[in-house]
Image (spheres, rainbow, N blue to C red):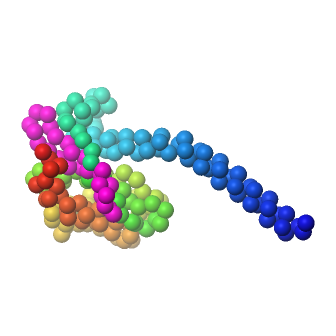
Amino acid sequence: MNKGLRSGLVLLVLGIISGTLLAFVNYFTAPVIAVLEEQAQYDALKEFYYDVDDPNYASFKLSDDYNLSKVDIEDDYIQSIFVVKSKDSGEVSLGYLVSANGYSSDAPVAMLIVVDSDLSIRGYKVISHKETSGFGADIVDNDFNINVITDLSGFDSVAHVTFTSNAIYECFYQVSLRVVADFGGDLVD
């Protein structure tokens, strides 16, 4: 057998073994990663309802004060909507898990944007991204000057990080397209 054919067969066998091992590891880690990602979403929601500087912040649970449900969505941008209803006042907020492509081709910028029934934004937070450190990754905690979801005219992008700013704007825009219908529909009943 010639040397090239033997090397090719060895590489083929190693590829099959490596692929099988990766599939095996993914089988066990994918559920754990999904649980951690969902916990990050609930942790972000909690920040919008409680003062993070309060010494008792760690012990607060959204479920103590709010009825909470999650609706998964089949949409190119919006993955889920969290319906948060105050047990005391009955006020409803909708939290949108939304994503759009930024500079990184590995993963989109994913945000949680929470909107109150008067269409004011309770808060927003970037949940995940793979933007470039020192550029796009550094703007995720910026104030983008959006206070009402149906008025994006004051959006403040950040210079020199156009792709990431565009992704964040797109997230706000996609939520603005849905939110009025969602508050008027079955989600808040």
Q: Nearer the viewer, residue 95 or 11?
A: 11
Name the residue rendered at 33%, 63% in the picture.
76
Question: Residue 3: where, in percent of width, then height?
Answer: 88, 67
Would you place residue 149 above or below residue 24 in this image? below
Spot occupied by residue 103 in the image (x, y as percentages of width and height): 43, 68
Residue at 65% x, 48% y: name it: 21
* Residue nearest the observer in this picture, 69 or 148: 69
Can the viewer see residue 147 in this picture?
A: no
Q: Residue 90 in the image: x percent, y percent?
A: 10, 39
Q: Is residue 86 left or right of residue 129?
A: left
Compared to residue 182, the image places residue 6 above or below, namely below
Query: In the displayed structure, does residue 144 sit left or right of residue 109?
Result: left
Q: Quadrant of residue 36?
A: top left
Residue 110 is at least partly visible in this image:
yes
Which residue corresponds to the image point at 42% horizontal and 57% vertical from the top-left?
Answer: 129
Name the residue nearer the viewer: 65 or 168: 65
| Foreground pick, 71 / 65 | 71
Q: What residue do we see at 20% from left, 42% from top?
A: 84
Q: Which residues are magenta?
A: 72-95
Magenta highlight on residue 74 = yes
- Left or right: residue 3 versus residue 31 is right
* Residue 59 inside the magenta-drawn segment: no
User: Is residue 86 placed above or below 75 in the rendered structure?
Assistant: above
The C terminus lies in quadrant:
top left
Say if 160 sits above or below 86 in the image. below
- Exactly how many numbered labels are in the figure? 0
Which image quadrant: the N terminus? Answer: bottom right
Q: Position of residue 79 (x, y in %)?
A: 32, 55
* Residue that sits furthest to the right in the current view: 1
Q: Quadrant of residue 6?
A: bottom right
